[in-house]
Image (cartoon, rainbow, N blue to C red):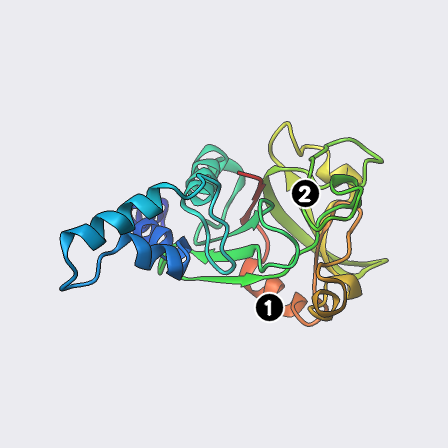
Amino acid sequence: MHDHDVARTRRAFLSNGLILTGSLAVPGAVASAIRPAAGRDSETAAANRASAQRMPASPIVSSRVVRPELLRRAIASLDRHGAHIRKRDRIAIADFTAGSSQPRFHFVDLASGRSESLLVSHGSGSDPSHTGYVRRFSNDFGSNASCEGAFVTADYYVGKHGRSQRLQGLDPTNNNALGRAIVIHSAWYANPDMIRTHGMLGRSQGCFAVGESDLDQVFARLGPDRLLFAAKV
């Protein structure tokens, strides 16, 4: 796919896909509250609108859905680092606003607008109390923390965690990723049964650890020379 085709596809995706994504991200109960049913009188509709307005303005985090603001930032990062990202048809987004019990590792096809979501662990240094949520990021050596920003996926290798994929950090917030060995690998503590028994995944040393049965599809969907964007928005 040529760059001008990708740019045109991306513009269409943002104008159409974001609207769809935003609607999917609204929980069903909220959507029904703000959408008056046909045949109801104006008083009921007004009450529904007032009820919706009283809801706290907290970030909407929904599993298997990429939130619009996060997607916009990922696309902006893809444009900003275009010279370093050779393949621009698909991207991965780690939504570290969501907890580790949710499928927050999103693989987005920019041509079709479709996405698939998997579980992914964060670093122990990002969540010292093991709450299941990222509390802080760090780019420092020895921090065992996840780092945020844009990565470009690199080569595969076999290391202490088995089959793994190197990542090169492209931002000041993650440019030590290669030296810190922040990679994609599988781990037992990222398997779904951890949620059933502990309510959350275990923690990595800053790597993007996925379930052992998910590694093949992660490698197949992402591959080398593509963008991985991690953030807490």
Q: Which residue is mark 1?
A: 217
In-image side of 138 versus 88 (left or right): right
Task: Identify the secondary structure beneath mark 1.
Answer: helix
Assess disc 2: are there few (<14), some (14-19) or many (≥20) residues with their C-alpha within 10 Å of its C-alpha: many
Task: Identify the secondary structure beneath mark 2.
Answer: loop
In-image side of 138 versus 171 (left or right): right
Q: Amino acid at mark 2?
A: Val
Residue 195 screen position, x and y as percent: 70, 65
Give the number of the mark in front: 1 or 2.
Answer: 2
Query: Residue 233 shows which numbered tag?
Result: none
Q: Amino acid at mark 1?
A: Gln
Residue 175 screen position, x and y as percent: 68, 32
Question: Marks 1 and 2, Cα distance to the nearest angstrom?
Answer: 25 Å
Q: Which residue is mark 2?
A: 134
Instruction: Please report whichever mark, 1 or 2, sits nearer to the chain's N-terminal start.
Output: 2
Residue at the spot x=69%, y=35% of the render?
137
Residue 177 screen position, x and y as percent: 72, 39
